[in-house]
Image: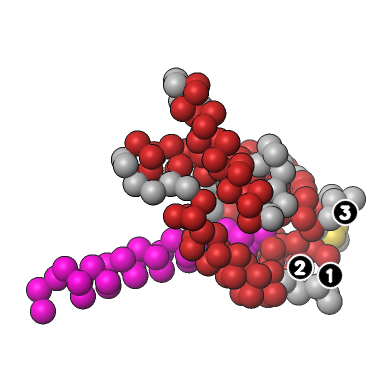
Amino acid sequence: MRISELSAASGVPIPTIKYYLREGMLPPGEQTSATRARYGENHLRRLRLIRALLEVGRLSIAAIGKVMAAVDDESLDLHHVLGTAQYAMAPAVEPHASGDEWARARAEADAMIAGLGWRVDPAAPARDELAQAVLTLGRLGLPAGGEALRPYADAALRLVTEHEIGTIPLDGPREAAVEAMVLGTVVHGRVLDIMRRLAHESVSARVFGTP
């Protein structure tokens, strides 16, 4: 398809597609003349991935560029590509002024992950995110230990194992598997958050609302 057809099929304006091409986020098309190129389904799929990371994942263009570079690096296995996407999505967490308090929260988070038997890189940003949650819960006088948060861990593991990883197409092109993995991480994360908020509203209406 021509770039105009690619734009129409993806909903991405032609100037934006050209920008993605210049930045290396979108692979070049097949040159048919000095000024024309032909694009295929892989370009359409990549544009949809970029837009999902931008609009649903709320990643910056710079972060998306890093994810796309990892997608295109065939020397990286799927685990490291997924890690690139996850780390790009993680919000920055600054240690609190109280060094001892932060250290205790981070130690509690690390112990929780170790107790679950999960293989998580020591530098994973989600460790600091979990420490932040533990610290905040503790300050509010709410349960923040491993047992209190275990139901959330169990639910997350079940969803990832049974519904997310299992949907990755491993019998086709590597690119399709990588893109499904990255896109699934972003969209499924949003779906989980949305469904949890909807469930909160429903249960609150039943328990606290007026019949």
Percent position of residue 92, x then y: 53, 35
Query: Which type of secondary structure does the marked residue at label 1 adopt?
Result: loop
Residue 111 highlighted magenta (yes or no):
no
What mark, if any, has residue 176 been given in the picture? Answer: 2
Q: Residues within 10 Å of mark 2 (few under 14, many from 20)?
A: some
Q: Determine whether, in the image, residue 79 is placed left or right of residue 4.
A: right
Against 54, residue 122 (above or below) is above
**Which region is colored magenta?**
182-211
- Mark carried by residue 173: 1
At x 9% / y 73%, what residue is drawn?
A: 210
Label 1 amino acid?
A: Pro
* Mark toward the start of the polypeptide (1 vs 3): 3
**In the image: residue 177, left or right of residue 103:** right
Answer yes or no: do the residues labelled 1 and 2 have beta carbons within 8 Å?
yes
Residue in the picture at 88% in, 54% down: 74
Q: What is the number of the mark on residue 74?
A: 3
